[in-house]
Image (cartoon, helix red, strand yellow):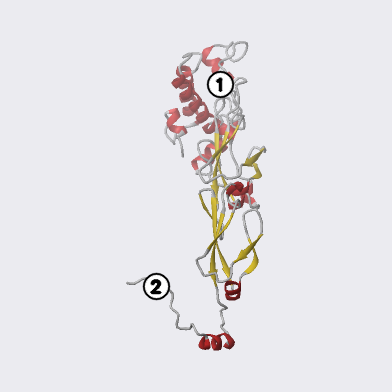
Amino acid sequence: MSWDPYASLGVSRTASADDIRRAYRTLAKELHPDVRPGDKAAEERFKRATAAFNLLSDPVTKQRFDRGEIDADGNERMAFNTRGGPRQSARSYAGAGAGPGGAGGGAAGGDPFDLGDIFSDLFGPGFGGARTYSRMRGRDIRFTLDIDFLDSINGAKRRISLAEGRTLDVAIPAGVETGQVLRLKNQGGAGVQGGPAGDALVELRVRPHTFFRREGQDVHMDLSISLTEAVEGARIQAPTPGGNVTLTIPAGSNTGKVLRLKGKGVAGQGDQFVRLQVVLPELVDEDLRKFVKKWPKRDYSPPRPNG
């Protein structure tokens, strides 16, 4: 959890709905930008206190937070999964943690509340009506998105569903890596009094591939070839992140020989390196045994390290 909404309001986890409301009223009266204009630190504390109040004053989101189902920003505690199934619709409760003026919420007992009413109580009946308070940007919301290795190499587009019914189209650029964060402008929490919305920050996590490995801008893989292909040479189909290509195996290739496919690495910028592995059949037939026994170089020993 990146922050504690109870601590932001200065209340304990056993605080009642009235305690939460009183704590927020006190902080709002102290920190509101119209009370402390130009004080950026106070403005940030006010935003955080308002986000905490939005989360904890709604019985549903409060219970889900207390159970550990969502974090302080209202995001589901699960990573996105774009492979389909129920995990594909990962959620975010942007309204709960969206920042001051975030969408909706409920007061104690589930009754709707209006932040304008609270500010009118604090600063007078004209406040929030004819008199407006400061426009403020909404809070950013953060997600984690799991993506396939090939999508990280080639780029892709993914649509994710949020709990409040919104969907976000995420364009994954070619060449991204685990830990990279994509910023979706104005897709976060709602702003205050017409202020701009926050952003959605999507942190990417790349799933490992079954045989491709990434090293910088290059892609590496091991490729099994038969004894015949190793001895005589061959042209075979080899996988790359962009699809199969024809690979020429030189005659006399040994296990460990590395072939380079230029431009077949990350986003067409790096290269792909294919390490050959000569593989014998699981069951060696009698003809091969007879050949080896008569082979003139049967006593040949390759170089080996000395212990």
Q: Position of residue 153 (x, y in %)?
A: 59, 49
Q: Does residue 151 sit above or below 256 in this rendering?
A: above
Residue toward you, 266 or 130 = 266
Q: Position of residue 237 (x, y in %)?
A: 66, 64
Residue 81 in view of the camera: no
Q: Position of residue 53 (x, y in %)?
A: 51, 29
Q: Position of residue 126 (x, y in %)?
A: 59, 10
Q: Residue at x 57, y 78 (%)?
A: 281
Checking the image for residue 304, the label placed there is 2
Residue toward you, 149 or 133 = 149
Q: What secondary structure is marked by label 2? A: loop
Residue of label 1: 136
Which quarter of the picture shows residue 260? bottom right
Residue 131 in view of the camera: yes
Instruction: Determine whether label 1 and label 2 are within 8 Å by CB.
Output: no
- Quadrant of the frame with the C terminus: bottom left
Q: For mark 1, does the 10 Å Cα neighbourhood hold few (<14), some (14 to 19), or many (20 or more) residues?
A: many
Identify the amino acid type marked 1: Met
Q: Residue at x 64, y 51 (%)?
A: 86
